[in-house]
Every structure is written in structure tokens, then in C-alpha cells.
Image (cartoon, rainbow, N blue to C red):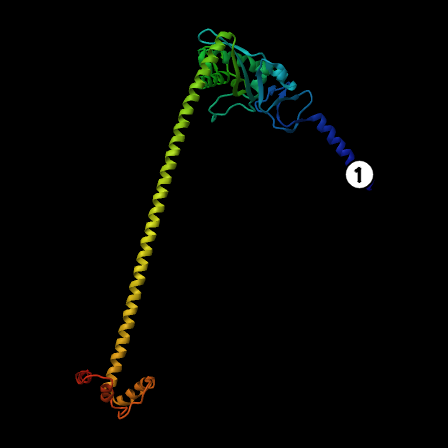
């Protein structure tokens, strides 16, 4: 049973593989497929390209052509040995362009282009064709496509760059402006010049890169070289002058900044000295006020003691207690005939006059 099932699966797989090989085709990455119907009501090329992947086809009835989707390049180059071997078929000799003042310039350039996958819609600003227009106008071979782009580039660049004078080739703004004109001519074409635009044939020119341009007459080349050298020397002199000005301005600003910093340092030191002086003054004032308060407190204490000696109840006891240490300190003799509690006798003993005793009593 299992063997029969396995055989059936193998047969089905082989049948599908044969069908895919006979009735299918795979579009590789980086390419688009263009379906071609060989006969019948839909005979001709499809308007839209097929994306990469597997697609069905009927043998003899339809076929699929491959067209690159990635960016392509075409070179006008004077030295083909520098060109990679895989792109040798897309390389041509440099263009010879005659300027407005009858000088001949050899131009080396690279044309970057791609192929549209479908015709433009009504919402798109640029009208262009799709892969069908490409096959119908240029054929299905790469050589035919390259030749179509090469002829359009030759015509457009010669016409656009030929409007420049000899010296204007070294003016990047004037040169790039004419390169843009050449791109527009290649894409859109020109009715007055009988140039068919590539966009209508399914080809989009993305950019034109001018790599090198050389005058065929050595006299003109040397004259322009000398002129460019002189311009560069003048530009260098101007740049050096501006650099010197910038250095002088920088030094001046640095000196001003140092002076400002020095002024700020001196001002800060002065302010600090003022603050320290004010702090010392305030400290002295507070100490003086504290000393005054202490002196006043001591004076008040002495006044209260004096009042207690003279008027208070039991003052005689307090006087005796206060006089005790004084009497103990007396040396060198004995005091007799004095009542220790008689203050007037003691005062007379110490030599005070009656008037001083009366004044003491009055207080």
C-alpha cells in the first residue's frame, strides 16, 4: 500500500515537472518578461512586462522575451582597455563635438538608462511607452537597444554641447545646463531636429555623466589650461587672503576675550575683597554689640548688688558674706574694735570720708 502511494506521488511530481517545463517559463531576477502571442486574436506583444518568477506559456502559441530591469550603462571612452570585458559591447569611441566658435572637443561620457515595464498612465507627467514599444521600435536584441541609445546620445550631446563656446566647457554651471538639455532631447526628442525621443520607445535616460573633455588642438588646450591655472591661482590668492583675515579676526577676538576674562577676574577679586571687608565689619559690629550687652549686664548686676547691700532685707548678712573673703585676704595685722557687720566702721577704717559714706547711703 505504501509503495503504491509513493509511486503515485512520484508519477504526479514528474507529470507536474513536465507540464511546468513544457508550459511554463521562469523570469530571472533583474529581468522582466515580455509575452509574445504568435497567432490568433491577441497576436503581438503584451503592453506590460512580467515580473521575475514563474509564468505559464503555450508552446508555439506564445513565447516570453527577456528585457533587463536594472540600470544599464553605455560609454564613450578613449581607452577601451580600461573597460570591463562584460561591458565591452556597450563602449564606443569618444564623441567629437564642434563648439559654437568652431573648435573640436573630444568628450568621454557615460549614459545611464533603463527600460519601462509598462506604458505611462494618465496620471504620469512624462508620456512613455512600454516593452511593446521597445520591441516594435528597436527589436528584441540587446545590440539593437544599445545602438538605439548610442545614436540618440550622439545626436543629443552634439546638438546640446555644440551650443557652448570654447571656454564655456570649463564652466560647470553652463556645461551641466547643456547636459540636462541633452537628457531632455534623448527622452522627449525634438520635432525641429527630427530626433525621436527614447521615452516613446520604452527607454528612459536617467543620467549623462561627462567624465572628460579634451580639445583636439593643442594650442587651444594649452591656452585654456593656462587660463584655468590663472583662475585657480586667483582663487587661491583670494582664499589665502580670506584665511589671513579670518586668522586676524580670530586673534583679535581671542585678545578681546582674554581682556574680558582678565577684567572679570579683577572685578571678581575686588567684589570678594569688598564682601570680606563688609563681613569683617559686620563681625566687629556684632562683637562690639555683644561686648556692650555683656558690660551692661555686668553693670546692672553690680547695681543690683549695691542696692542689695544698702537697702535689702537681710543685707547685713549678705554684706558679711561678701566681706568674708575680703577680710580673709587681708594680711599683716589684726583689726580690732570693729563690728564686722558695721559697714560704716569698715569704710572709715579703709579711709573713706564722711561725705563718701553719706553719698553711699544716698545711693
Please state, as top left, top right, bottom left or bottom right, where the C terminus lies in the image: bottom left
Q: Is residue 124 left or right of residue 257?
A: right
Looking at the picture, tell me which residue is in the foreground, 60 or 119: 119
The answer to which image quadrant residue 315 occupies is: bottom left
Residue 293 position (above or below residue 267) = below
Does the rendering let one see residue 84? yes
At label 1, counting other C-alpha atoms closer than 10 Å, the crowd grade (few under 14, some 14-19, many 20 or more) is few
The answer to which image quadrant residue 73 occupies is: top right
Q: Picture coordinates of residue 331 (x, y %)?
A: 33, 85
Residue 213 position (above or below residue 327) = above
Does the rendering let one see residue 141? no
Q: Secondary structure at mark 1?
A: helix
Q: Is residue 11 left or right of residue 81?
A: right
Residue at figure coordinates x 42%, y 24% from the top left:
240
Q: Is residue 282 left or right of residue 116?
A: left
Instruction: Give the number of marks.
Output: 1
Looking at the picture, tell me which residue is in the foreground, 315 or 342: 342
Q: Which residue is mark 1?
A: 6
Residue at figure coordinates x 42%, y 27% from the top left:
243
Q: Picture coordinates of residue 92 (x, y %)?
A: 59, 13
Looking at the picture, tell me which residue is in the foreground, 271 or 220: 271
Q: Picture coordinates of residue 177 (x, y %)?
A: 45, 18
Residue at figure coordinates x 27%, y 70% from the top left:
292
Please state, as top left, top right, bottom left or bottom right, where the N terminus lies in the image: top right
Q: Picture coordinates of residue 342 (x, y %)?
A: 25, 90
The answer to which image quadrant residue 316 occupies is: bottom left
Amino acid at each position: 500500500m505504501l509503495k503504491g502511494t509513493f509511486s503515485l506521488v512520484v508519477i504526479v511530481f514528474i507529470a507536474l515537472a513536465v507540464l511546468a517545463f513544457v508550459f511554463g517559463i521562469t523570469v530571472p531576477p533583474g529581468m522582466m518578461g515580455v509575452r509574445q502571442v504568435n497567432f490568433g486574436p491577441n497576436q503581438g506583444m503584451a503592453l506590460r512586462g512580467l515580473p521575475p518568477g514563474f509564468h505559464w506559456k503555450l508552446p508555439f502559441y506564445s513565447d516570453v522575451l527577456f528585457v533587463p530591469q536594472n540600470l544599464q550603462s553605455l560609454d564613450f571612452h578613449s581607452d577601451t582597455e580600461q573597460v570591463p570585458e562584460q561591458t565591452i559591447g556597450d563602449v564606443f569611441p569618444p564623441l567629437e563635438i564642434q563648439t559654437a566658435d568652431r573648435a573640436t572637443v573630444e568628450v568621454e561620457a557615460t549614459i545611464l538608462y533603463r527600460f519601462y515595464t509598462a506604458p505611462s498612465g494618465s496620471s504620469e507627467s512624462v508620456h512613455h511607452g512600454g516593452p511593446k514599444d521597445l520591441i516594435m521600435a528597436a527589436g528584441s536584441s540587446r545590440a539593437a537597444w544599445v545602438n538605439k541609445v548610442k545614436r540618440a546620445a550622439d545626436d543629443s550631446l552634439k546638438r546640446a554641447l555644440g551650443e557652448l563656446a570654447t571656454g564655456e566647457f570649463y564652466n560647470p554651471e553652463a556645461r551641466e545646463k547643456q547636459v540636462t538639455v541633452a537628457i531632455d532631447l534623448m527622452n522627449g526628442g525634438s520635432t525641429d531636429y527630427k530626433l525621436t525621443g527614447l521615452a516613446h520607445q520604452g527607454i528612459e535616460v536617467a543620467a549623462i555623466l561627462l567624465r572628460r573633455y579634451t580639445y583636439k588642438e593643442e594650442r587651444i588646450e594649452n591656452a585654456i589650461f593656462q587660463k584655468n591655472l590663472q583662475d585657480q591661482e586667483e582663487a587661491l590668492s583670494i582664499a589665502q587672503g580670506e584665511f589671513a583675515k579670518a586668522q586676524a579676526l580670530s586673534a583679535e577676538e581671542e585678545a578681546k576675550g582674554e581682556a574680558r576674562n582678565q577684567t572679570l577676574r579683577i572685578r571678581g577679586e575686588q567684589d570678594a575683597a569688598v564682601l570680606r571687608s563688609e563681613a569683617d565689619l559686620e563681625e566687629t559690629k556684632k562683637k562690639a554689640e555683644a561686648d556692650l550687652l555683656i558690660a551692661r549686664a555686668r553693670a546692672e548686676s553690680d547695681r543690683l548688688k549695691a542696692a542689695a547691700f544698702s537697702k535689702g532685707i537681710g543685707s547685713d548678712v549678705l554684706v558679711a558674706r561678701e566681706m568674708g573673703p575680703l577680710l580673709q585676704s587681708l594680711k599683716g595685722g589684726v583689726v580690732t574694735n570693729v563690728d564686722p557687720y558695721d559697714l560704716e566702721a569698715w569704710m572709715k577704717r579703709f579711709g573713706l570720708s564722711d561725705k563718701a559714706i553719706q553719698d553711699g547711703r544716698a545711693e
